[in-house]
Image (cartoon, rainbow, N blue to C red):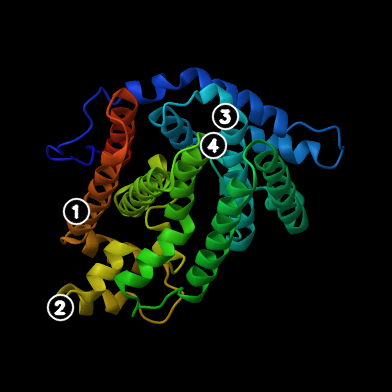
Amino acid sequence: MKPLEGKGLPYGKGDPRAVLRRIEGPMQAVEAMLKDILSTDDPFLKPVLDHLARGGGKRLRPALFLLSVEACQGDPYEFVSVAAALECVHMASLVHDDVIDEADRRRGLPTVHRLWGTKAGVLAGDYLFARAFSILAREGGPRVVERMAQVISDLASGELQQQNSLYRLDQSEEEYFQRIHQKTASFLGECCRIAGIVTGQGEETQDALYRFGQRVGMGFQVIDDILDLVGDSQTLGKPAASDLAAGILTLPVIYGLQDAELGPRLREYLQDPPWGRARVEEARHLLLASDAIGYTYRRAREFTEEGREALASLPPGEARDTLEDLARILLLRSL
């Protein structure tokens, strides 16, 4: 598959491959800290946490946080424990998501609840939340805990919204954007804001960092929704259009349903849920042959550009440029 082309986006001054190299050392320290967090002598928890440690992940949240610390002229090594705690919150939320979604696999491995049962999945997530918030309270202080409590609230609200909107063909773009704000973008925004908090920045800088992370997070999720449709089972690790098959309507689908010509044709396949695989594939092919993917990509680019503009109030330099490069990578990534 060809990469999703950015068509000359006017930002990202540095070499995108250098983004993660810039924080390679601190990210290695984050991995060591995560290993410590996931270590236990408890005979019941140990196999579960060992399994989670093998799952890996993008580590996007700690990377955004550490790059934002640098942009605030702070030392990333000083805040490795906070970065690890942010990733720990993400891991906990994924364990709970898998229970809610009854998912069989995560990152190529069986999910916790499939191996040890639903109770173990819920309690493992709770344990990770507790470990993370203990670190955040000690290393970040009350303001950081307050912001992460808002993230947890948003995650729960977004998940409830998603469950209540399954298979609903009358969803608006506004509903979709609110949902992905709560499920994804809010967390990324707070990772950046927290960098401003721990480095002692003023409210204006904290707000700018939040807007950067939140808008980039919106674009990130919109691109994910494109990849779910244009990918294949080998590259995705799951069947293409898995969200649609589960009744989750993403932006390309909502756009298609609202299109005067495409909408009626899509509705022929998306009546009487749950939708079988054959109908999902027919709907997917209709979307791929339309402007739904192009429109969705343009919206992702708009969000990313808004995030880039938010960085204008930060001191110019390599650290700020690196954040812009990361935004570009997230927009242009492909399978």
Q: Which residue is mark 1?
A: 298
Give coordinates of residue 273: x percent, y percent. 44, 78
Q: Which residue is mark 4?
A: 198
Q: Which residue is mark 3?
A: 79
Q: Residue 260's mark?
A: 2
Q: CA distance from mark 2 to mark 3?
A: 52 Å
**119 and 324: which one is in front?**
324
Q: Nearer the viewer, mark 4 or mark 1?
A: 4
Residue type at mark 4 is Val
Q: Nearer the viewer, mark 4 or mark 2?
A: 4
Q: CA distance from mark 4 to mark 2?
A: 50 Å
Q: Secondary structure at mark 2?
A: loop
The reply to whether dot 3 and dot 4 touch (C-beta < 8 Å) is yes
Q: Earlier in the sequence, mark 2 or mark 1?
A: 2
Q: Earlier in the sequence, mark 1 or mark 3?
A: 3
Residue type at mark 3 is Phe
Q: Which corner quadrant of the image does residue 100 belong to? A: bottom right
Q: CA distance from mark 2 to mark 1?
A: 20 Å
